[in-house]
Structure formats: structure tokens, C-alpha cells
Amino acid sequence: MGHIVKLVDGHMVYDGLLSSKEKASIDDILHALQEEIPTIEADMKAEYGQGVWYKYNLGLFLGSLLEKYEISVSERRRFWDEIKHFATKEERKRDEGANSVTRSFYQQCYILSQQDKDVVEKLTWRQWQDILDRVGNREDERIFQWLKRFTKKIREDDWREFEKALNLYLKGKDTSVFETEELFEIYDSIMLMSVKWREQFKVFSTEHPKSAKIKSKGKWSKKYYALCFNKKKEQHSQVVTEEMCYEAFTALM
């Protein structure tokens, strides 16, 4: 595409010095987007609702636009912003940051559309946003193969904790050194940690309803994950075991 329009102080301006012919070409593209995007979004919302399949199919359409208008990787964020500011009728309130493409709604829909359908269905859109926001957690794309092995959707709270624990585990690590099955065992053990945290914290909350730790659950979950990983290291284990989870929780709570 070469040049993209953008907002400056609320006004539309062209990016770069353009001839009248180039401006006319960009105007034609923008007009086409203003015609297509609202219709496509409305039709898909009517068919799929607001869930993950709406975003997946919208992403497929967006991918066709990238190819049609020859949008380079470096231009994507501005192209998505062009759609957001000038074409869509939807109000996208989520903070997407200023420059990074990672948190862009349309970029996330596009990335989602590149996944196999039997992977897409394993998570809700909110869960997909969690992993799409955390580039480091999905840098090793084998995590999508791992997701495919689940027979049903993953609980929202388990996934949220899994993402936190995985982010902690990955600091300073290169997962490319692991064979696929080794990596899957690590993912499994981190999910185990997350599930055991939920189960044990529920019991703790029932038995100690006035504990101050209940209000600072997030802080204690991070300490729990760190202690689990320390126990794994001390015992020279490749993965965190259920016994380590119980020991870590008991020691902290």
C-alpha cells in the first residue's frame, strides 16, 4: 500500500508526500473499507454473536485485506488504526497502546484466524486476548499444538493463573531446547499448578474466611508459583508435581 492515512489532532492526514494520483488511490481504498467493514462486522456479529468465532471469521476477512492492499508487516498497526478510526461503526474502547501492534483488536483477530479451528474452540475470546497480549507466552508456537490436546474448554480462572505462572517460568528461558513432548509435560505441570492453586485456595477461603490473604490473592498466587518452581529446581525435576504443589501451598498459607 505504501502510504496510509492517520489521525493527527482529530484530523485525517496522509502519511508522506503524495501525488494527487496516489491520494486518489488511497481515498478509493478508504472508501472501500468504509463500505465493507461495517457490513462485514454486522453480518458476522449476527451470525456468530460476540464470541470467538466472530473474531476468527473477521480475522479471515482482515487477512484477505492485507493481501489485497499489499499491507506489509510494518504497516499493519497503522492499517488497523485506519479501520478503527475511519471505517468501523463499532466502538473499540480497549486500550491498545500507541504503537505496538500486539494489543490491536484487528491484529488479534487476524492472528486468531491463523490458528486451526480445533485450537480456536478451546478458549474463549477473553482467554485468547490473554495469550495474544503476552507475546512471550506464545513465542514458542507449540503452545497452540498443546492446546489442541484438550478435550474441552479450559476454565477462565485456570487459564488466567496458567498465563501468570507460564510468564514467570519463561523468564530467561529458551524453550526451543525442549523436545515437543518435554515442553508439553512442562505446560501440563504448569496447568496442574494452576488447578491446584484454585482448589486449595477455595478450601483455604472456606476454612479461614477472615484471612487477610484472601484480599491479596494475586500476590500469594505469585509466591506459590515461585515456590513451586524452586522446589522443582531443588529436586532436580523437569516438571512440578502435585506433591510440590501441596507442599508449596501449605508452606505459604
Image (cartoon, helix red, strand yellow):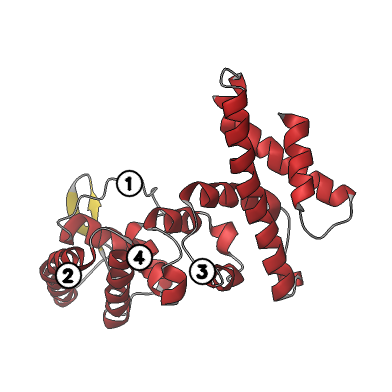
* Residue 59 sits above or below residue 156 on the image: below
| The C terminus, quarter of image | top right
Q: Position of residue 28 (x, y in %)?
A: 13, 74
User: N-terminal of the two: label 1 or label 3?
Assistant: 1
In the image: residue 250, left or right of residue 122: right
Q: CA distance from mark 1 to mark 3?
A: 31 Å
User: N-terminal of the two: label 2 or label 3?
Assistant: 2
Q: Which residue is mark 3?
A: 151
In the image: residue 89, left or right of residue 205: left
Say what secondary structure mark 1 lies in. Answer: loop
Q: Which residue is mark 4?
A: 109
Q: Quadrant of residue 78?
A: bottom left
In percent of the image, x 28 and y 58: which residue is there? Answer: 81
Q: Nearer the viewer, residue 92 or 3?
A: 92
In percent of the image, x 79 and y 46: which residue is there? Answer: 244
Q: CA distance from mark 1 to mark 2?
A: 21 Å
Say what secondary structure mark 3 lies in. Answer: loop
Q: Which residue is mark 1?
A: 94
> In the rendered image, is residue 141 in sight?
yes
Q: Position of residue 228 (x, y in %)?
A: 76, 45
Q: Which residue is mark 2?
A: 40
In the image: residue 132, left or right of residue 96: right
Residue 128: which numbered mark, if any? none
